[in-house]
Image (cartoon, rainbow, N blue to C red):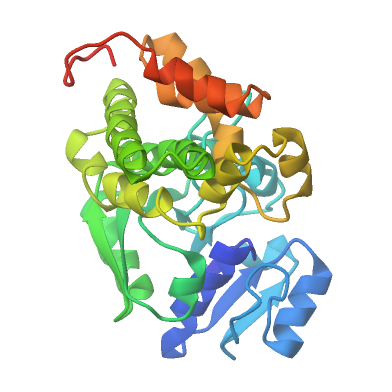
Amino acid sequence: MKVGVLGAGAWGTALAQMVASDGSEVLLWAREAQLAEEINTQRRNSTYLPDAKLAASIRATDDLGEMARLDAMLVVTPAQHMGSVLEAMPAFPQDLILCSKGIEAGTGRLMNQVARDNAPESEVSVLSGPTFAHEVAAGLPAAVTLACSGGEEQWDRIAQHIARPAFRPYYSDDVTGAEIGGAVKNVLAIACGVVDGLQLGQNARAALIARGYAEMLRFGEALGARAETLTGLCGLGDLVLTCSSTSSRNFSLGKALGEGQSAQALMADRKTVAEGAHTAPVLVELAARHGIAMPIVAAVYDLLKGDDPGQVVKGILARPLKAEQESAG
């Protein structure tokens, strides 16, 4: 099976490095021809993954036509650009493995819906879980969910080609659940970063993770996800990791907001994408449409609009007292 990676950011490059770790040939698409040349000639991605010495079996290209000739492609473009990149492809591999975490602004489409609209004849799967790019690139152990729309037949076809001794995928057929876990946790990670930036302590962060997880479950179940999926690697597992470390771009963004930096300045200056900032507004809209209470997500949206972090936190703390398991949030 010919496997490639669409997107040479930190996560895409790390996945290419992981697949190539046993000597397998991997084709890596970079939007910039200069970056593709650097990967091919210097074995480095100095912009997005500077500490990794890339495997010799990785070949980079800026030609989307080459990617169409693969058997399977890990799609790792920023969520808000996936649609435009896929629209530019002349044809598609049999299997599209979606690794971007977000919800498309303006349309509210999940990434699997974006992929299906552009490549209706391909089978879609979602790879998601608690992973930092630099650790995966370094060969440190990681476990992920691989949710396959084509069921076990698709799983049997592709899992063996991406599993490695230090990279273990677990099977699911709940594509919606795998996607929602990854999208919502990015927004909640911003909130946890704010707590850290305001120096509110570990108790507050633990409470926020728990209450944020309740929001994730409510939203996911309303859109057809299974609760057990969100209890696993691609939901709770990813949430705990992303909400606990400055290695998370979303957590780092929230921390800077909590320390008093401007949301507008932070978003304009960031070299890498904090997907939660783009997901928060559409998540608020979808939650309202479905009648789902998501106060933490709404608070993150207010922060990104420029509201004072201290006042936003006070507003959350002033919410009416209620039963912990009450479905209204």
Work out whether residue 165 or residue 268 is closer to the camera in this orientation and state it.
Answer: 268
Residue at left 45%, top 11%?
A: 288
Where is 231 relative to 308, above or below?
below
Left or right: residue 207 versus residue 35 is: left
The answer to which of 64 and 39 lies nearer the viewer is: 39
Q: Position of residue 292 (x, y in %)?
A: 35, 14
Q: Is residue 253 left or right of residue 132?
A: right
x, y percentage for residue 125?
Answer: 38, 51
The C terminus lies in which quarter of the figure? top left
Question: In this rendering, is residue 274 above or below 109?
Answer: below
| Residue at 45%, 77% in the rendered image | 19
Q: Residue furthest right?
A: 34
Quarter the N terminus occupies: bottom left
Image coordinates of residue 205 in percent, x first then y, are: 36, 41
Residue at horizontal 48%, vertical 43%?
199
Residue 118 visible to the viewer: no
Q: Looking at the image, can residue 202 be seen?
A: yes
Q: How many marks?
A: 0
> Which percent across, then down, holds residue 147?
31, 50
Give the quarter of the image for residue 317. Answer: top left
The residue positioned 41% from the left and 62% from the top of the image is 131
Which quarter of the figure has residue 163? bottom left
Task: Tell which of 265 and 79 is nearer to you.
Answer: 265
